[in-house]
Image (cartoon, rainbow, N blue to C red):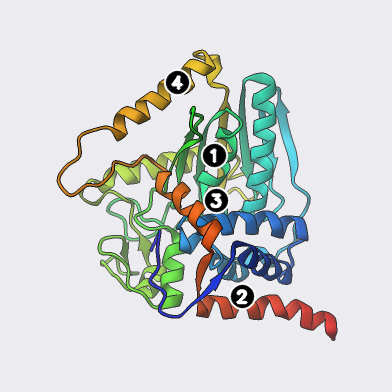
Amino acid sequence: MSRHVPLDDAVHLSVEEATALGTRALESIGYEPEEAAAACAHLVDAACCGYYFAGLPRILEINDDPRSKQARVPIRVVRETPVSLMVDGGNHIAYYAMYKTALMAIDKAKKNGIALAGLYNCALSGRSAYYLELIARENLAGFLFCSGFPVVAPEGGARPMLGTNPIAIALPTGKGPFVFDMGTGGIMRGELALRGRLNEQLPEGVAIDAQGLPTRDPHEALKGSILAFGGADRHKGYGLGLTIQALGLMAGAALPRGNVQDYGHLFIVFQPGLLVPEEQFHRDVTELIRLIKATPRRPGVDEIRIPSERAYRQREQARKHGLDLDRKVFDALTKMADSKAEARAE
């Protein structure tokens, strides 16, 4: 599900058609053209990379989120030094606020070698890899930690207390960005919600119901909790998730409402040349990847892949051949997008 969804009744769209549909749908629920375009570019890229749940279906979740109905104010820097900035996202959708903050962090890191950037007062940030790839394409290294509203139970707990709290790392190489991105929940909240819409069962061992019992029913899981990733070693996923929740406080998660379990996004961006010659780093990390891919393979294994390699390949294919969208999702988005035109006609 995180990569491919079996679509029995699918609508095939070109990337341009998907982008137009998504942008119109976002504008129909009140997002300004610049914000809608930035968010939709992210969503379509996620779909191209094979993360169906993180693509256009997310617009349905955005529409259902009460924050999308609340007032937005301009994004602003509330504290700044030569190597840091704290950004109030103004309740804008995080797809947009994160993009703007990433660009500011890139600019500061290019000028001063390193940048720390915190972003708060925004939610729904999508794939961290999207922002980290922007950073790596500027020959910068980056870390991104995102805390969120509680949907994950602590190890042994029966109630959600942590976000799915992804961690992402990006490095520039001689052959393009190396990006590693993972959530610390056993399943992402967006995928859980989409499975609920499509009435699809969950994998074993990723969620519990409101009584703390294992469940594969997405509707019961939405009433209960996601579990941390890791299976028998789930305590490791829990520990990492808790650590990222704490780092979110450094990014300002508790500033708007005093809630220590809110959304916070912490960027660390720097020039590799601060530590080793930049060209040498590019050569060395490229050679490391070559050696890993050349490792003798176990029986039945065709290839050893590195993080993001599959996504990059699938992106290229999707840009050429288009995307499939579940008809239920397509119909809902079309109705949403058309509602604005109908309102104007009236």
Sequence-first tag of 1 and 2: 1
Q: Do the residues labelled 4 and 1 touch (CB within 8 Å)?
A: no
What is the distance, in whole Å, between disc 2 and disc 3 at their CAs?
A: 29 Å
Where disc 2 sits, the SS reads helix
Amino acid type of disc 4?
Arg
The residue to which callout 4 is attached is: 283
The residue to which callout 2 is attached is: 333
The residue to which callout 3 is attached is: 262
What is the distance, in whole Å, between disc 2 and disc 4 at their CAs?
A: 46 Å
Amino acid type of disc 2?
Leu
Q: Which dot marks residue 305?
A: none
Say which residue appears at 23% left-offset and 45% top-offset. 233
Say which residue appears at 64% left-offset and 68% top-offset. 17
The residue to which callout 1 is attached is: 132
Of labels 2 and 4, the one closer to you: 4
Where disc 1 sits, the SS reads helix
